[in-house]
Amino acid sequence: MKNTENKLSDIEKKIDNIMNNHLQHIQTSISEMGDNVVKKMEECFVSKDRFKPVEKIVYGLVGLVLISVFGAMIALILK
């Protein structure tokens, strides 16, 4: 009886050890994946600070085009 209980206890300890090792491996893998995602985002996307000048130029050009289109339409109507 005692021998069987000792064997069961040893098996439980081995299983716990294996599960803890796998859990640590999974946590490490998830951490590495998170770091990789952050690096990829920094490479692929532009921050708002760097985008602001481009945004102002594009909005200015779009506004200029719309004013000229509406001005031409008003000029056609008034003729």
Image: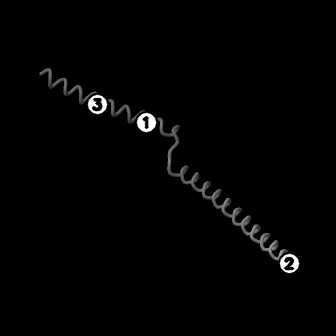
Specify which label sits upstream in the sequence, 3 or 2: 2
- The answer to whether 16 is drawn above or below residue 31 in the figure is below
Viewer-closest of 2 and 51:
2
Q: Which residue is at 57% across, 54% downward?
A: 37
| Residue annotated with mark 1 | 55
| Residue annotated with mark 2 | 1
- The answer to whether 71 is drawn above or below residue 39 in the figure is above
> Total label count?
3
| Residue annotated with mark 3 | 66
**Image mark for residue 40:** none
Per the image, label 1 sits on a secondary structure element best described as helix
Other-residue count near label 3 (Cα within 10 Å), few / some / many at <14 / 14–19 / ≥20: few
**Residue 42 x/y as whole percent:** 55, 49
Please identify the residue farthest to the left as the structure is shown: 79
Amino acid on which disc 1 is placed: Glu
Please identify the residue farthest to the top as the structure is shown: 78
Separation (CA) of disc 3 from disc 2: 91 Å
Specify which label sits upstream in the sequence, 1 or 2: 2
User: Left or right: 6 with respect to 62?
Assistant: right
Amino acid on which disc 3 is placed: Leu
Separation (CA) of disc 1 from disc 2: 78 Å
Q: Which residue is at 24% across, 30% downward?
A: 69
Q: Quadrant of the C terminus?
A: top left
**Residue 21 x/y as whole percent:** 73, 66
Per the image, label 2 sits on a secondary structure element best described as loop
Amino acid on which disc 2 is placed: Met
Separation (CA) of disc 3 from disc 1: 16 Å
Q: Nearer the viewer, mark 1 or mark 2?
A: 2
